[in-house]
Every structure is written in C-alpha cells, then in structure tokens.
Image (cartoon, rainbow, N blue to C red):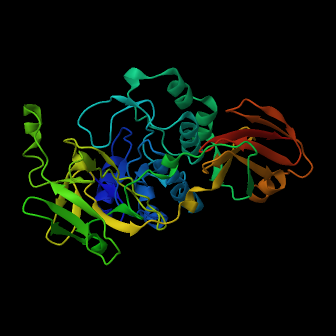
Amino acid sequence: MTVFGDDLDIDEITFVSEVLRKLDRPILYSLSPGTSVTPAMAKEVSGLVNMYRITGDDWDTWRDVFSHFDVSRDFSNAKMIGAKGLLGRSWPDLDMLPLGWLTDPGSNEGPHRTSNLNLDEQRTQMTLWAMAKSPLMFGGDVRKLDETTYNLITNPTLLEINSFSQNNMEFPYVSARRSRRKEKVLPQDFAEGGMLGKRALSLITCKDPKANGWSTKALNQDLEQICWREKLEGPPCLYKRKPLLASGVEMIYKQQYEGTLHLLASDGMEICLDGSPRRRLTSKEFGGGSFSPCKWDANQMWELNANGSLVNSYSGLCATVDLLKDDAGLSEVRSWIATGRRGEIYLAFFNLKPEMTVISANLADVAKVFPWKNLKGVSCKYHEIWSGKSGVTKRWISIAVEKHGCSLFVLTCV
C-alpha cells in the first residue's frame, strides 16, 4: 500500500504510476493517508496519481468535521484541487462520508448504529466536501439507507458543484453576529476527544522523538499505570491491563494482539482508550482519542515499547500528550465560493460556532475574488438550497445559520 505523507516513497509511487500509464484500460490510482501531509508534498505526487488522502480517518464527530476546514483551505490555496494528474486530473481526498448506518472505528463487528452527526452537521460535511471537490465516497451501509441520508448524498446541487464547479476556494470576506434567539450550549459540544485534565491525547508518527514520553508506574504488586513522564503538574496516567478474554469467540484475537494492552481511564471501570487516527493534519491542530467500553478492537490495543513510545494497533500511530488549548478555535465562521458552468456563483456559509449565528457577505467582496465578473450595480437572484428561500439582492447576502450548520446559495447575477 502506497501512502501520502512524510513517510511517502516517491520512487514506489512513480513506479506504479508508470505501470498504470501504459495499460490499455483506465485504473484510478489513489494514495492512502500517511502522516503530516502538506501541499508541498502534494506537488510531488499529484501528477502521478488521481487522488490522495490529506487527512486521517474521518469519523462521525464534530471535531472530525471541523478539522477538515483548515486542511481543505490550504490545499485550495496551493491550487491542488483538480491539478494535473495521472492521465487526467488529481484531487485531494478528505476521506469517506460517515453517514447513515455505521460501525465503530477499528471494530470487528457491525454496522450497528446511526451516524452521530446531526442533520445540520451532515449538511456541513457534504457541502464542504462538494465545495472542495473532494472525491465523494459513502462510508455507510447502502443496504440500510434511510431517505434523509439518500436525499443528502444525491442532492443535485451538491453533485453539480462537486463535478463541474471551478475556482473553488475559501471566501474570507464574511461577517458574523450572534443570533438574537437564545440557545442552550451543551457541555458535550466541547468534550469530544481524549481529554486528560487540561491536556489532550494526540496521535503522531512514531518516528517523531516526541512520541517517546511514556513510562510505567507501579502502584502495588498487581496494579500499574502508564504515565506521560514529561514534567507537568499532575502528569496524566492510564491504568494498564492485559485485554481480558470474555468468550471463546474472542480467542481468535489472542495471537493477533499478543503483547498489547488495554488502557483504562480508572481502576475498576471498563472504559478503555480508543486510538483511531483522528489526526488534525495542520500544525495548529491536535488529534484525539476517546474512551469507550472495553472491547477486543484494534483501536483499543496499545503496545508500550522500550523507548517509551505507546503504539496503537489500529492506526500504527503513537500517543503523545499536549496542553489543551482554549476551544476558541471552534468558535468560527467560514465560507467557500465557486463558479458554475452556467455562469452561476455558489456561496456557502459554515457556522462552526456552538450557537446560532447570522453570517453575511457583500456582493462587492464577491467581485474581489472573481474580478472578471461585472457585479457592479447588478441584481443577483439567490436560492438557498437547505431552507428553500429565494429572493433578489443588490448588495448583501445574509442568513441565520444553526450551530454547526451551513447555508448554500446559488447566485445568478445579471
């Protein structure tokens, strides 16, 4: 398997690309995710492939959705969307869409549950994926496809944007104000990720020396902890335990996970650390683990090496501990813009805040990013696809957007 990241093998990717180029039938060449991807790396491989993953595995949490805004912006700014590729074009891949009927990260069972994203969050994800022209791949069970999910993934406007739009980019000229409607903010909006006091678990490549920071601490003859040994006040610790065999069925995993450990949040509670690779692949972002009931899943299996690295069996990444930054980064609004093949303009507002927010844009600012379009003094008909609202404006586009939700306008200006 070839990967894209700081562990890529450009010679291997080139060799495979040359083989595929000589075939008499088309084959799509896609790279799996590596670690710490950058647009500069993409410039090395984009001409050799058709698509390449630029994030870790995307699952159905708001933090996972949120993490894609910076990385998609960076690759758009670098002009990597639709760049020259293998026998055609290449596309930064934001990963599959975790919608509909799903399993759990690293699970050996399922699918058995619906997506944890609410409808507003699902629309936000689909709209960003479409505006960023990421390959659209459904990550749920198509045998159990509900009407709401079907209508979302087959929305004709989103598919039109994803397939035929151009000049796709983040649009920086938006303003925001709090909606007058009061809304209760739930604590869980800020509780996703593997938080340890005022710190957070991050998953990084095991080649990074920062990963070598774990050691064991004996509490008594039968009980040990694994602690982050950096000099922090009250260093975070996890309880160490060999995975328990609960039934004969689970014996099949014994050899596979020999030498691995379950890491528990506290002694006596069957809550274990997960390590699915929800890494934020920009320098300012951190990834996370989370705790869930202990199971024989690869994402809950860890191995402590002699060099102090703590390796996850599912992702192959290593755990570190970072100081938890203020969640102010989650309180943002974003916008994307693109042009359509019939002369229309697509304008998307994204409310990443934990409260309803009014987001606005001035048509004069649209002219700044599309200077070839004469928007001075013209009237623009608009249609917002999620609310169904339509109208005409000469200056402002403004709408109240639900928390974690989005709005998508189709503008026709004459």
Task: Tell me the quarter of the picture where residue 194 sits.
Answer: bottom left
Q: Quadrant of the C terminus?
A: top right
Give the side of residue 35 with respect to residue 263, left or right: right
Measured as percent of width and height from the top left, residue 373 is found at 81, 51
Question: Farthest residue toward the right?
Answer: 377
Query: Can the viewer see residue 79 in this picture?
Result: no
Residue depicted at 35% across the width and 74% down the height: 233
Measured as percent of width and height from the top left, residue 102 is found at 37, 32
Measured as percent of width and height from the top left, residue 360 is found at 77, 50
Placement of 215 over or under 202, stated as above or below: below
Placement of 329 over or under 148, stated as above or below: below
Task: Tell me the quarter of the picture where residue 14 sits.
Answer: bottom left
How many numbered discs?
Answer: 0
Give the side of residue 62 with respect to residue 141, left or right: right
Give the side of residue 287 with respect to residue 252, left or right: right
Task: Tell me the quarter of the picture where residue 131 sits.
Answer: top right
Placement of 18 over or under 126, stated as above or below: below
Question: Farthest residue toward the bottom?
Answer: 231
Query: Can the viewer see residue 215 in this picture?
Result: yes
Measured as percent of width and height from the top left, residue 157 is found at 64, 33
Q: Nearer the viewer, residue 273 or 52?
A: 273
Placement of 111 over or under 54, stated as above or below: above
